[in-house]
């Protein structure tokens, strides 16, 4: 093939010197999502105020401010649930208008039902409601027009950011695409080397679409990596070949096998993060006396830090530091996690044995949740040296890397089903992995709530040691 096209940005630099841009298309889209939702909300509020200024005071026989707040709250809720702010609506302004108007209609219907349930429906001016809706519709069109202009100014046609990794083949990139010569930069997801996978994940961070052009022998390995990434992942092929593809895409006039579409939509990520913070922040304040008491007990019993910090594999197969209360004596701490704690483990202190049996040692992970490294619910993060019998976790099943497409959790499906404690053999890991992959494939906010409630039943567990 010929060299890369001039409108594709090519990066052929050593891996250790490459860093993704801090301000990416994802960041710009988040700003546009916020602006879009704000403008839509202002449009509905403006329509209400305009209607109220044109009609007399009897068109709405209930407190107007209360009605406006209820309507706006419903509108925002439906807008988020209908994904009125998404990549699809930025690409297609008519779709954005359609979803915003549908959210407005849903909010109106619920508000009307609430009013009629209060037996005040007969006193409402129907003309006033029609006028309110008409103004809101017109102002929503203006709002969406502003967002469309802002999108073209800030993103042009590059609404999604794409990186093409060349691991062998040399092909043309497309307009606006970042092209990285992966082989020259030493980037390859070696499934036996967590550091190698973490480095590729670091380089591809911030991109929405990762396309890999590689030799046949490397396609399965790249596929496993892409299925564990947050972005959509595709393998460039000349002819259709099956490596677990979920669809067919296009790049540089060639077919791609879509092996991953990313774990959650923007609205789902927003809901999950909002749930995490809504529960975690008040909980940390509430249990602060307990945290302080445990810290004092640990400090009084043995020398060393209160917290145990360890490298764990997190979302996108990137490493992060997890926090736990230190439950072992300082001189025998296992930084890599190569040895799982056993029932009669002589490394565990007296205070440590109590806090491990009651799961209190896990509470500092609430700070990991606040920092954004973890979620309340998700696959449990493992140490880099964790063993299932005598084999490292990823040596037991290559699908292990796919479990990291979501943030790791303080609890998860595997934990409430009793799969916790030491991994003495491959079956122990396989049971947990199966639960993790099931969770990834069936996530919902209700599943998270169900897992949280079920976790209380297993806080004190016969395998918690």
Image: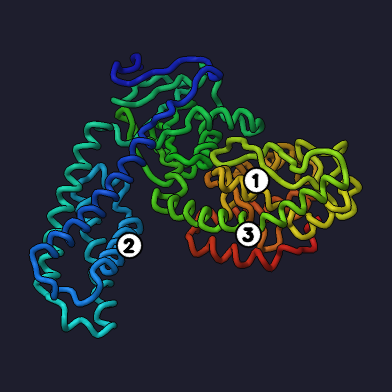
Alpha carbons under labels 1 and 3: distance apart? 25 Å
Give residue 459's quadrant in the image: bottom right
**Lower position in the chain sequence, tag 2 or tag 1:** 2
Determine which residue is flagged by label 1: 381
Label 2 neighbourhood size at 10 Å, few (<14), some (14-19), many (20+)? some
Q: Nearer the viewer, residue 78 or 95?
A: 78
Determine which residue is flagged by label 3: 286
Residue at 22 percent across and 58 percent down: it is: 45
Q: Secondary structure at mark 2?
A: helix
Determine which residue is flagged by label 2: 73
Q: Secondary structure at mark 3?
A: helix
**Lower position in the chain sequence, tag 1 or tag 3:** 3
Q: Secondary structure at mark 1?
A: loop
Q: Position of residue 341 (x, y in %)?
A: 82, 49
Alpha carbons under labels 3 and 2: distance apart? 28 Å
Quadrant location of the N terminus in the rendered image: top left
């Amino acid at each position: 093939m010929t060299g890369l096209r001039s409108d594709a940005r090519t990066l052929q630099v050593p891996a250790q010197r490459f860093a993704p841009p801090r301000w990416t298309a994802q960041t710009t889209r988040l700003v546009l999502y916020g602006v879009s939702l704000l403008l839509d909300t202002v449009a509905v509020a403006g329509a209400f105020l305009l209607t109220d200024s044109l009609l007399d005071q009897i068109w709405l026989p209930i407190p107007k401010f209360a009605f406006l707040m209820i309507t706006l709250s419903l509108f925002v809720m439906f807008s988020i649930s209908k994904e009125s702010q998404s990549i699809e609506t930025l690409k297609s302004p008519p779709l954005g208008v359609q979803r915003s108007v549908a959210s407005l209609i849903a909010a109106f219907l619920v508000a009307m039902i609430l009013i009629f349930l209060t037996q005040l429906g007969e006193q409402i001016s129907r003309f006033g409601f029609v006028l309110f809706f008409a103004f809101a519709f017109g102002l929503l069109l203006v709002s969406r027009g502003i967002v469309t202009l802002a999108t073209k100014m800030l993103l042009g046609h590059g609404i999604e950011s794409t990186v093409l990794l060349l691991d062998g083949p040399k092909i043309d990139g497309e307009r606006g695409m970042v092209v990285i010569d992966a082989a020259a930069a030493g980037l390859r997801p070696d499934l036996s080397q967590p550091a190698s996978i973490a480095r590729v994940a670091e380089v591809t961070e911030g991109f929405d679409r990762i396309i890999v052009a590689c030799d046949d022998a490397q396609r399965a390995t790249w596929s496993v990596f892409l299925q564990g990434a947050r972005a959509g992942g595709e393998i460039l092929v000349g002819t259709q070949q099956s490596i677990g593809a979920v669809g067919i895409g296009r790049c540089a006039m060639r077919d791609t096998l879509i092996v991953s579409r990313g774990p959650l939509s923007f609205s789902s990520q927003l809901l999950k993060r909002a749930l995490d913070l809504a529960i975690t922040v008040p909980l940390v304040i509430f249990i602060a006396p307990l945290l302080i008491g445990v810290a004092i007990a640990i400090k009084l019993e043995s020398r060393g830090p209160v917290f145990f910090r360890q490298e764990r594999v997190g979302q996108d197969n990137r490493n992060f530091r997890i926090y736990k209360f230190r439950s072992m004596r300082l001189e025998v701490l296992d930084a890599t996690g190569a040895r799982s704690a056993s029932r009669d483990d002589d490394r565990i202190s007296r205070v440590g044995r109590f806090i491990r049996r009651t799961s209190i040692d896990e509470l500092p992970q609430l700070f990991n949740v606040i920092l954004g490294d973890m979620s309340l619910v998700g696959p449990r993060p493992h140490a880099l040296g964790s063993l299932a019998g005598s084999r490292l976790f990823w040596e037991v099943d290559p699908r292990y890397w796919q479990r990291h497409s979501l943030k790791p959790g303080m609890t998860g499906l595997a934990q409430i089903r009793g799969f916790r404690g030491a991994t003495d053999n491959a079956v122990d890991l396989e049971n947990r992995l199966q639960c993790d992959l099931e969770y990834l494939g069936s996530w919902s906010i209700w599943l998270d709530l169900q897992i949280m409630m079920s976790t209380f039943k297993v806080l004190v567990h016969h395998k918690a040691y």
